[in-house]
């Protein structure tokens, strides 16, 4: 009987963890609710923790897309070497802790706006959708 209770407890914990992580894993993490997301993030575990990795890789893609726009509109871009996991995870945790009703995309938008930009010549820009 004790064995059955232990197995039931382990299964229940597993399902509650999976249910808690599901929106992070299956949803758009940048548009997640900060109050819910911050509970899943563990910056001290780096990219070994799945929600951390999902957020970081989402941010890399988002900044890359923003750079296409910045290059074409302003002939500058964010230095992606500024986008490291420790910096981004801590930035989002700090922002989301202070703004639980907001979304992490707001923190990343601010990061993009305030980051030092690299200026390029207009000839070095491109429009990936231009035929």
Image (cartoon, rainbow, N blue to C red):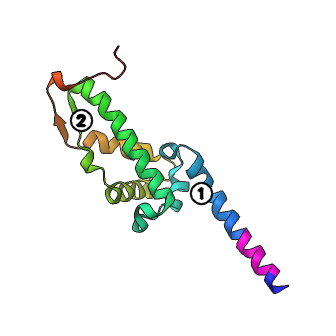
Residue at horizontal 42%, vertical 60%? 47
Name the residue rendered at 30%, 41% in the picture. Answer: 112
Q: Measured along the vertical axis of the image, is residue 121 above or below residue 47?
A: above
Residue 54: say if magenta. Answer: no
- Residue, far front: 131
**Quadrant of the rendered image containing residue 1:** bottom right
Q: Main secondary structure of the magenta part?
A: helix
Which percent across, then down, holds residue 73? Answer: 26, 23
> Which quarter of the rendering shows the C terminus?
top left
The numbered dot on residue 62 is none
Where residue 118 appears, x then y in whole percent? 17, 37
In screen coordinates, is 101 left or right of 22? left
Dot placed on the residue nearer the N-terminal end, 1 or 2: 1
Question: Label 1 crowding class (10 Å Cα cut-off): few <14, some 14-19, many 20+?
Answer: some
- Report the magenta residues as a range: 4-11
> SS of the residue at dot 1?
helix
Q: Is residue 69 above or below residue 7?
A: above
Residue at the image position 50 percent from the left and 53 percent from the top: 100
Secondary element type, mark 2 = strand
Of residue 90 and residue 14, the one placed in the foreground of this image is 14
Which residue in the structure is indicated by mark 2?
77
- Pick out the residue farthest to the top: 131
- The image position of residue 106, as x and y in percent, is 41, 43
Callout 2: 10 Å neighbours few (<14), some, many (20+)? many
- Residue under pointer 1: 21
> Is 9 a magenta residue?
yes
């Amino acid at each position: 009987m004790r064995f059955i209770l232990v197995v039931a407890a382990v299964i229940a914990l597993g399902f509650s963890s999976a249910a808690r992580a599901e929106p992070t894993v299956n949803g758009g993490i940048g548009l997640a609710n900060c109050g819910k997301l911050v509970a899943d993030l563990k910056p001290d575990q780096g990219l070994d923790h799945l929600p951390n990795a999902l957020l970081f890789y989402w941010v890399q893609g988002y900044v890359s897309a923003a750079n296409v726009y910045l290059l074409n509109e302003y002939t500058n871009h964010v230095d992606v070497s500024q986008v490291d996991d420790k910096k981004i995870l801590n930035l989002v945790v700090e922002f989301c802790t202070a703004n639980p009703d907001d979304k992490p995309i707001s923190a990343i938008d601010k990061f993009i706006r305030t980051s030092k930009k690299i200026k390029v010549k207009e000839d070095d820009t491109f429009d990936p959708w231009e035929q």
